[in-house]
Amino acid sequence: MKTFAELGFPGRLIAVEGLDGSGKSTQIYLLKRWLEVQGLKVFFSEWNSSELVKSATSKGKKRELLTPTTFSLIHATDFADRYERHLVPLLRAGYLVLCDRYIFTAFARDTVRGCPMDWVRGVYRFANLPDITFFFRAELEVSLQRILSGRPQLKYFEAGMDLRLSSDPYESFRIFQGRLLERYLAMSAEFKFTIIDANQPIEKQQSLVRQLVAARIDLKQFARESAVHTTA
Amino acid sequence: MPARNPKANLRKALPNKAGVAVPEIVVPQPRPRSFYGHGLPNVNPSHLQGRLIVVEGADGSGRSTQIRMLVEWLEGSGHATVQVGLKRSELVREELEQAQQGNILSRRTFSLFYATDFADQLENTIIPALTAGFIVLADRYIYTLMARDLVRGMEEDWVKNLYGIAPIPDAVFYLNVSPEILVQRNFAKNYHLDYWESGMDLGLSRDMFDSFLKYQALISEQFHRLQRIYRFTIVDGNLPPEEINRELRRRIQAVLMEKRPDTPR
């Protein structure tokens, strides 16, 4: 597997990964704002957001119809739709593409649910690697606290209730998140995750994220057409 | 009264008081089963004791007629049946239909959408039915999906891995009908050709008639290639339906009696 840069795409893909409540969505939002303010070509894409597929996914989740295999495949369908209709064309057009969750989310979740790792990786083999993958690592208790204090009503699949880990949704959520964290850490080296300490203040994390992005990507190249003219 | 020796069941009739002969029902014996690849989490293939019979072929090849006749015969012979087919899942049927109307999804997305539809029926219908000892009749199976994907340029390894979740059927019949006859049958039925069955998304020709012929030839080519890998039975779909059905029954009868699978991977 290769990154988009290695494959000669003019665009760059930055992904964030982490447990629910690790603060990754806040961080990628702030990164997006910073890039936009500079007048750069930016596109943001979120896991499980393709319009058409979403209706099937939410139906499946509501009716608790999903098995580990269909859970995996429906998210792969969502990903493929976004990947082929948005991500790849925009990367070819020289955009900075920001992804809130990428294939690693599937690698972690689907295998915790019991799908074989080889099979899941095989399904996602069409996807190239991000140019930067930030992994927001918070203490398990910290991310649990953030989710459990903000949204006391845990959803069935979010809490991993389908795994029958515990009849108590909170306990189930804890065990599920703990297993996800193990999976993420196990693939961290292989996929060159850039680990950010998510226990730090938001500003401190964001400052680090921006420095790393600026150091690894030549941002000037991503200026919008109009921005090029005004600076020229 | 399950007989130990299945051969003893053949043609044996027990007379009752009214003098009506009630033929003894063949009780299929357990036979080994496996998946094409990794299989499904939490599913033990040795529990899948029913029989899985697949009928493949293009639209207009006579699949549904054959399946209807097989259901008649099987139920008449005392076997419980369940039918599955493509785009029939509760999970994504409507969305898939909608996506096809709009023609807005990429090839890979369609492929995965169909795989999701298949997996949903596999886990919610096929697996429970086989576990309960039903005869499952599949109106198309993974081979159609694979052939469509391959014609659209998906990598063979990718497709094979994807459908490694599928149990290996006990019998697979491919109703082979020449594209020229398919055209005639489709017109006789609907007076039009289906956009997808004509492969219009591939841009083979702007003329739908031409496209249909070219696309069906490509699919048929893939089927013949897949046949060499998966060893399914090619049936001449140009023959009269009754004649075809006799052939299918003969082969299914053997599958019901036998222990050893005759469809190696």
Image (tube, coloured by chain):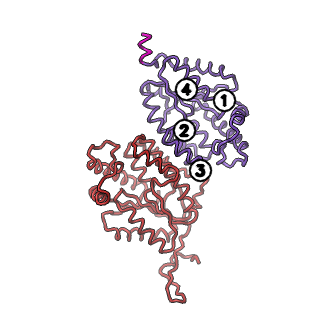
Residue B215: percent from left, percent from top: 32, 49
**Colour assignment, chain B:** red
Chain label for disc 3:
A
> Is the magenta region chiefly helix, strand or loop?
helix
- The local secondary structure at tag 3 comes to loop
Q: Which mark is residue B75?
A: none
Residue at the spot 55% in from the left edge and 56% down from the top edge: B124
Q: Residue A63 carries which label?
A: 3
User: How many angstroms separate mark 4 from mark 1 (CA)?
Assistant: 15 Å
Q: Are the residues flagged by discs 3 and 2 from a single subunit?
A: yes
Which sits in the foreground, B228 or A56?
A: A56
Chain label for disc 2:
A
Specify the segment rendered in magenta: A225-232
What kind of residue is marked 2?
Asn
What kind of residue is marked 1?
Arg
Closer to the camera: disc 3 or disc 2? 3
